[in-house]
Amino acid sequence: MYAIVEISGRQFKVEKKQKLFVNRLDTQEGKKVSFEKVLMVNDGTKSSVGTPNVSGAQVDAKVLKHLKSDKVIVFKKKRRKGYKVRNGHRQAITEIEISDILTGVSKKAAPAKKEAKKAAPVKKDAKKAAPVKKEAKKAASKKDKQDLTKLSVAALKEMAKSKGVTGISSMKKADLIKALS
């Protein structure tokens, strides 16, 4: 039995009792860790491929130790310029041992469905709150109609023209506001 798991941004093919090195995990040595991002599970007879994850699948592992990987030398040089730089880098890694590959429905998935059912009545409350929003929009549009000082002179002239006010070409902003209100 094997599984393909995403651990800290990288994908690994893991089997039970397998030891592997992954990027540094934020877990103490000796503690157990579980990974829910299982992309594929194969138990010898059938395989389950997730879209993107297999639902209910989980891989449990134990953190053995934290260490640094082998040194990688980074050497930069520009020819005929006298430029040479030599740097070393050691990546922080964690050694883990896969303890179990679970394919059944996990206990965490069942409460999530119950929470989804509880969330449905909240949506009904949101629909009831929608008319309040419409009333608020109407009140806001009335305020916008009353507060004509924020509009430009050109916009005020267009509004006056649509209402049939005469002599708008010689009017100033204050006169236009008086004529419209």
Image (cartoon, rainbow, N blue to C red):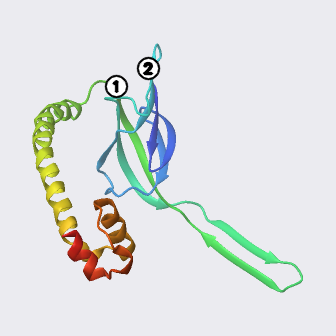
Q: Residue at x 31, y 73 (%)?
A: 151
On residue 43, the disc is 2
Label 1 sits on what residue type? Thr
Secondary element type, mark 2: loop
Res 152 visible: no
Question: Circle 2: is it few (<14), some (14-19), or many (20+) Cα within 10 Å?
Answer: few
Could you say which quadrant of the image residue 105 lies in?
A: top left
- The reply to whether the C-beta atoms of the residues labelled 1 and 2 are less than 8 Å apart is yes
Q: Is residue 77 left or right of residue 6?
A: right
Could you say which quadrant of the image residue 94 lies in?
A: bottom left
Res 38 visible: yes
| Residue labelled with disc 1 | 103
Quarter of the image where the C terminus is located:
bottom left
Q: Residue at x 21, y 76 (%)?
A: 178
Q: Position of residue 4 (x, y in %)?
A: 48, 34
The furthest residue to the top: 45
Q: Is residue 117 left or right of residue 6?
A: left
Could you say which quadrant of the image residue 50 lies in?
A: top left
